[in-house]
Amino acid sequence: MNILQALFFPPEQPGGVSSMVPYIGERFRKIGWEIELFSIPKRIRNKGQEPFEFDTFDWRLYAGNPVVDKYMQTLKDYVWWTKLRLKSGYDLIHAHHPVAALALRKIYPDTPLVMTVHSSFERELILNGRIAADGPEHRFLTSLYGELEAKTDKMLTVSHSFAGYMGAYMKSPERIGVIPNGYDERRFKPISHDNEVAQIVTVCRLVPAKGIDLLIKACAELRKRDRKFVLHIIGDGPIRPELESLAQAQGIYDDTIFYGYMLHPEEMLPFFDIFVLPSRAEAFGSVFAEAALCLLSLIGTDVGGIAEQIEDGVNGLLVPGEDPQALADAIDKFILDPHYRYELARAAWNKAKKTYSLSRVIQELKKIYIDLGPPVEETT
């Protein structure tokens, strides 16, 4: 079978999609399937001029708002780039971003189309203070779920929590399939180490939605308790200067290392002890599974897909959102009891190996592809 895996930006961009989709292609190629990876370069801007319309709503009701206008131009740019670069047909298209799905449906109207929604752009924009809840941009972006439902042959997402969120904007939410992300275990190599001082790490884009301000405040509370730690912040983003200033104001700047963007953070993760990400919203939270496969103990907020990965007190600790004190208490438990944090890390590692295996994802996707695509000769 000849399948196009369509992303938005190239796979070297950080995030759960990039840490999984290229490896999906690699596995399918090993069983003799043809897999092509496609995305739009960041430099492509304002090239598309072909009009773009939706079947389920009129986007012009929201025109004039910057987020909406930019989204529509991006759709046109994706269509322009696709027509420029893709010539051959495909047995099936699997899109991993709404822009990719809607643009490719316009160009390949008769090709089976699978869409995996990996995250909520509108929730991220609201949490990052860029749009208002229930405003025109929010209504436009949530209307896209109904359009995707109408235009795709199969809708997938990465957690039951997010399926419930999407379903509120769809006619038949029961048709949404859930396939949690999977990871190639060969990329993750736990390393035996004994850190005298607890090494706390987080990996994310530095935006308000990720809650790193809460982590810094929690670590300031740990400093008041005279706990010893080093906080490692891997990632970059628009609020990095604010977070550095906050670390200084909270008196923990000397205990904090800002690394900036890193292409393969999994190479460093095994040397740390405690992974923390107090997200304000998360469709899945791929980095938790990655940290678990590196044998780190996990602490996250009780939101979205994080709560489906972590069972509090069994394979990690969950804390309420917007509560730096509770977050500090959770980290303190792991600092004071290395044996406890190791036991929970081991449980998280076992669950991640079983539940977030890339082999599981391949088998589930293979069934969907075979059901939707042309007949294929069975291979092992």
Image (cartoon, grey):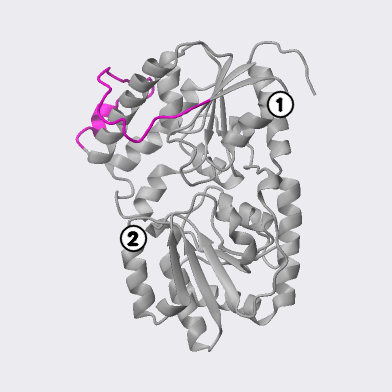
Q: Amino acid at mark 2?
A: Ile
Residue at the spot of label 2:
239
As measured in the structure, the alpha-carbon distance from the residue carrying label 2 to the one carrying label 1 is 42 Å
Mark 2 Cα within 10 Å, few/some/many (few <14, many 20+)? Answer: some
Quadrant including the C terminus: top right
Q: Position of residue 81 (x, y in %)?
A: 36, 22
Which residues, given as a range, are shown in magenta?
Answer: 37-64
**Residue 56 falls inside the magenta stretch:** yes
Q: From what the image shows, is residue 197 above or below residue 177?
A: below
- Which disc is residue 285 wearing? none
> Which of pointers 2 and 1 indicates the residue nearer the eye?
1
Q: Which residue is mark 1?
A: 30
- Residue 283 position (above or below residue 317): above
Report the residue at 67% width, 58% height from top: 294
- The residue under the point 63% across, 17% down is 372
Write the residue at 48% across / 74% down. Answer: 324
Left or right: where 5 falls relative to 178? left
Quick check: can you spot residue 54?
A: no
Say whether residue 66 is left or right of residue 40: left
Q: Quadrant of residue 249?
A: bottom left
Identify the secondary structure beneath mark 2: loop
